[in-house]
Every structure is written in structure tokens, then in C-alpha cells.
Image: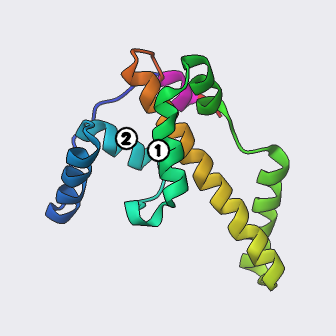
Amino acid sequence: MSAHAITLELPGPLYEHFKRRVERTHRSLEAELLDAVASGASVEDDEISPELLAELDAMTDLADKELWKIARKTMAPAAGRQLEALHSKQRDEGLDVDEDADRRKLIQDYERSMLRRAQAARLLKERGHDVSALVASK
């Protein structure tokens, strides 16, 4: 799958937010925006645990082979089915406390995985690899 260029007009405050991130991380604006889109959520830095930030930062030391493994990792099929079932039940009849806790944990694990995958893809791209196949893979 090929990459597609787009023009994106950001509201002033959102642009300033990403500009500060670029200055803080010494990355390009494109890399920051791609990570935000890939993660599927607008996550503020202060909403990410220090442990996860450290983990993402430490990924710069990983070999390409390990980064490819992380970038290709998907949610386990059983976990995906469980999350889908919980979403359906929540919509249709509601969840009890334990079910809601399970749903939240699955979402948290998924979001953490997406951040790790996006970081791996970014690092691979910076190292000169063609990561366009990652977008097409399921």
C-alpha cells in the first residue's frame, strides 16, 4: 500500500500543542502527527504513564528485527473477541463492575500496544525502512 500526501489545517491551539511536542522530542511535525493518527487517540503526554514513556524511549536501542516484531504485533484474537463481546453487551444491556474493569483493561492493553507499534514504525522509518506495508496489514 502506498502512502498518500494530505493537506491538513490545524486549529491554532492544536498546532501549538504539536509544535511544543516537536521542540521537546526533537522530531519532525510529520512524525508527531503520524504517531497521533496511528494511536487513534489524542493522548496528552501527562496521560501516559512515566513507565510507558520510558519504554517507548528505550525502544530506540532495539535492533531493527525486534522493532519489526513489535510493529507487526496485533491483539490476540481471543482478546479481540472478548472486547467486542463486552462492547456489544455494554451497548445492549450494560456491564457489571467486573465486566467493565475487564473492558477497560483490554482497551488499555490495546492502546499501549498501538503506541508501541507506532513508535516501532516511526523508528524503522527513521532508519530508512519502508513501513508502508504496516498500514496495509491487519
Residue 8 located left or right of residue 83: left
- The residue lying furthest to the left in this view is 12
Residue at 54% x, 18% y: name it.
64
Q: Residues within 10 Å of mark 2 (few under 14, many from 20)?
A: some
Q: Does residue 71 lie above or below 84 as drawn?
A: above
Q: Can you give x and y, in whole percent of width and height, for residue 52 in the image? A: 54, 52
Q: Can you give x and y, in whole percent of width and height, for residue 29 in the image? A: 24, 41
Q: Can you give x and y, in whole percent of width and height, for residue 60 in the image? A: 46, 30
* Disc 1 to disc 2, C-alpha distance: 6 Å
- SS majority, magenta: helix
Q: Does residue 60 lie above or below 20 as drawn?
A: above
What segment carries the magenta color? 132-136
Q: Which residue is mark 2?
A: 34
Magenta-span inclusion, residue 44:
no
Q: Looking at the figure, which quarter contains the C terminus? A: top right
At label 2, the amino acid type is Leu
Residue 77 located left or right of residue 57: right
Residue 136 appears in the figure: yes
How many circles with numbers are drawn on the protein?
Answer: 2
- The residue lying furthest to the right in this view is 78
Residue at 25% x, 36% y: name it.
28
Q: Can you give x and y, in whole percent of width and height, for residue 66 in the image? A: 62, 24
Say the numbered circle drawn on residue 38. Answer: 1
Q: Are marks 1 and 2 in contact (CB under 8 Å)?
A: yes
Please tell me which residue lies in front, 100 or 52. 52
Residue at 69% x, 39% y: name it.
74
Q: Name the colouring of the figure.
A: rainbow
